[in-house]
Amino acid sequence: MGNFVDEIPPYRFNQLTKIASKVVDTMVGGALQMSYDEMEIVLNMIRLGIEESRDKNDKRKETKVCS
């Protein structure tokens, strides 16, 4: 991940940081008090969603190349 972070422009990185901050604020504050295990479940759901989206995107790219 180190090299990829170096390629992100400062403005874009700032926007990503704001999104991450909102997710963390939701998990640790607010009306819903989450345990660490529940936080891990949420983060795993996000990771799985990203992987699924990436896989679908890769398949679409393969289909376009093959057409």
Image (tube, rainbow, N blue to C red):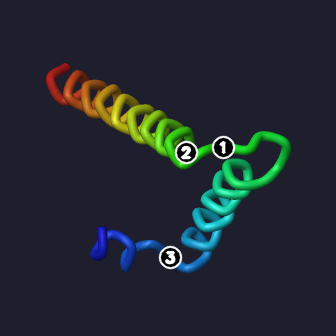
Q: Secondary structure at mark 3?
A: loop
Q: Examine the rendered structure and indicate whether residue 6 appears above or below residue 16.
A: below
Mark 3 / mark 2, whichever is N-terminal:
3
Q: Residue at x 65, y 52 (%)?
A: 23
Task: Give the CA distance from mark 3 to mark 1.
Answer: 33 Å
Task: Specify the amino acid type for callout 1.
Answer: Met
Residue 3 vs residue 67: left or right?
right
Taking 28 as reference, is 30 left or right?
A: right
Q: Residue 43, position in %: x, y?
A: 49, 44
x and y, in percent, of residue 24 in the image: 65, 56
Q: Point out which mark residue 34 bears.
A: 1
Secondary structure under the numbered disc 1 in the rendered image: loop
Q: Which residue occupies 55% across, 71% down?
A: 13
Q: Amino acid at mark 2?
A: Met
| Residue 66 location (% of width, % of height) | 15, 23
Q: Which mark is residue 39?
A: 2
* Relative side of 35 to 37, left or right: right
Q: Is 30 or 57 nearer to us in this picture? A: 30
Query: Which x, y percent locates residue 39?
Result: 55, 45
For mark 3, what is the residue? 9
Q: Residue at x 84, y 42 (%)?
A: 31
